[in-house]
Amino acid sequence: MFQPSYFKQKDNNGMLDFIRSHPLATIVTQSESGLTINHIPVLLKTRQNSNVLQGHIAKANNMWKDYQIEKESVAIFTGPQSYISPNWYPSKKRDHKAVPTWNYTTVHVHGQIKFFHEKNWLLEHLTNLSDFSEQNMPKPWHLSEAPEDYINSMLPAIVGFEMEIINMNGQSKMSQNHNEGNRQGVITGLQSQNKKNVATWVKNPDMS
């Protein structure tokens, strides 16, 4: 990923928090037939001095069959993003030296994947993932609410995986390369389109 210094994120804890709040990963793996791309919700787990991403896929998904263990994989997490009009820059009204751009936030994670078929591993993972995903619901659903025989009948149809994080790169491209007047113009423009989440990132562009 091309990373100009004013967009590059350096706070690892901030990037990990970004992953927790944007858990749908685009996972790119390599196989003998080429690149494989899947979109998978993952759970970030911390173990001693390492961080891993946990997820699961359908057993019918060839990702686990074709995966090349010696090859590195990438998980991409994306957050708020929006088109930015040059009409939002006060400087454009003075000299017209402005062009469109796109603001976005992303974290790229590099690592290697291991797959799991064991019942106990899958049950623990599914419990943790659903508890994490349900935590802000008015009445959180728990895996234990489903009939045990129903869950057991579904387990053979999935494969779990872990991806240990080897390297992590974050980018928050939120108009940091513009002066304060233009940045405020971007904020006002985004708010006029009800894109308050992106406007908030322009105000505070760091993942920290």
Image: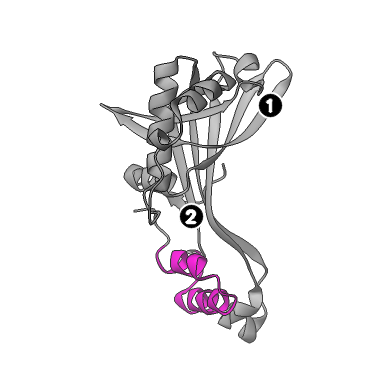
Q: Magenta residues: mostly which secondary structure?
A: helix
Please tell me whether residue 82 is drawn above or below residue 95 in the rendered image: above
Q: Residue at x 40, y 64 (%)?
A: 204
Q: Position of residue 177 (x, y in %)?
A: 50, 64
Q: Residue at x 44, y 17 (%)?
A: 119
| Amino acid residing under circle 1 | Leu
| Amino acid residing under circle 2 | Ser
Q: Which residue is mark 1?
A: 35
Residue furthest to the right:
33
Q: Which residue is mark 2?
A: 172
Res. 112 in view: no
Spatial CA distance of label 2 from label 1 is 26 Å
Left or right: where 4 falls relative to 52: right
Q: Which residues are magenta?
A: 177-204
Left or right: where 101 falls relative to 108: right
Res. 124 in view: yes
Q: Residue at x 43, y 39 (%)?
A: 130
Q: Residues within 10 Å of mark 2 (few under 14, many from 20)?
A: many
Task: Tell whether position 179 is magenta.
Answer: yes
Front residue of 173/126: it is 126
